[in-house]
Image: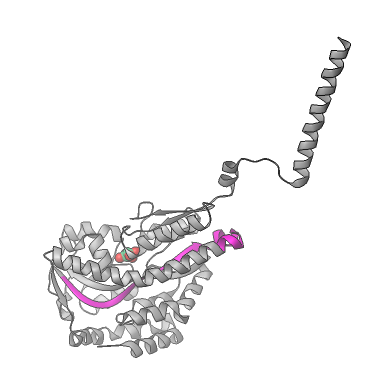
Amino acid sequence: MKALTGIVLILLAGLAASIWIGFHTKLSEGTLPYDDDQRGISEQVVIKFSHVVAENTPKGLAAQRFADRVNQVSDGNIKVEVIPNGGLYSDQEELEALKRGDIQMIAPATTKLSSFSSKWQVLDLPYMMPTRDSIIEAVNGEIGETLLQSLEENNLKGLTLWTNGFKQLTTNDGPIVQPSDLKGQHLRIMPSHVLKKQFELVGAKAVGLDFNETYRLLESGKLNGEENTISNIYSKKFFDVQSNLTISNHGFLGYAVIMNEDFWSKLTNEQQTVISKALEETTRWNQKQSFEMNDEQLSLIEDNSSIDIHYLTNEEKRKWFERWQPVYLEFEEEIGKELMSKMIQLRNSHKDF
Ligand code: LMR
């Protein structure tokens, strides 16, 4: 019996010793056992990316492409969740939600940033960027950089600029060929002093309203018309509730991709690099794909709807351009003479009508 007790004691002592040595070795090697899932969850960064347009649009597709790329490259450690169609916040609300930190990323139309810095108004001036090349030159160059930097004053991190395309005119009281054809019409615009003035100059009454209110107001006849890109006219079916579309290419619609500065600065260098690289790739893709998408969807509207389409001739464009010159003068001071003269130089080197 004594011998048996001795053997059991020796075995227990051996077991205790090997357990101690095992733990000790692991501790000294810094390889404490852990649960992969728990680690993943506690370190995962979630970025809620909210926007107001449909998924199948230049912004909707770019946002999803960016999200997929970040999720893939970071191996799921950074998770970008895209919420389209104003599903969480309307145009006005999303900026406030970003500032509060309720969401981490948005890509509003540049127009909607003029309340932060009046410099952004330069992109809204009619025919300021007359060609696609002029748009790319402006957004990718010094002008785009200046505008993105201006957001810092508001604790916002401007990351990149995406394009949608040229704005066109639609109405249920057309055709719109001459500036006087808009006289007395009620139009929806994005909230903007420049856009309001632009339409005042041709005798129209333009009201700044949320994007996702537009269809209902056009359908009910409370509004006669609106201005937007083909992609937005197509994806929100404005062509179903409008009788006339004028391809005027009179204005630009693009997006500033932004984050809350506090959120951005708390990310590690490595996380910032993953996001910046994914954005670089997405921006290159967006700036090509957005124009193609507007072209394709114009053909679809032409082939599948009864809306009458008029393409402004160069001579007609010149008339609108002349009529809109006072808006340049009125906003020059607010925008700043230096930025204004850079843009006008760019415009003059590209103007093709
Ligand atoms: C609009 O309000 O018309 C646009 O800003 C919508 C968008 O984001 O493209």
Foreground residue, 15 or 177? 15
Rendered-image quadrant of the C terminus: bottom left
Foreground residue, 233 or 121? 233
Rendered-image quadrant of the N terminus: top right
Foreground residue, 145 or 339? 145
**Start-end of magenta stretch:** 245-272
Foreground residue, 199 or 225? 225
Percent x, y for residue 135? 36, 79
Percent x, y for residue 165? 31, 72
Q: Is residue 243 magenta?
A: no
- Quadrant in the picture for residue 266: bottom right
Vertical comparison of 126 with 283: above or below: below
Residue located 34% across and 76% down the image: 124
Q: Tell me if residue 268 can be seen.
A: yes
- Quadrant in the picture for residue 3: top right
Residue located 20% across and 62% down the image: 238
Vertical comparison of 101 with 353: above or below: above
Ligand 1: which quarter?
bottom left
Q: Is residue 131 left or right of residue 161?
A: left
- Quadrant in the picture for residue 132: bottom left
Residue located 14% across and 77% down the image: 181
Percent x, y for residue 47? 49, 54
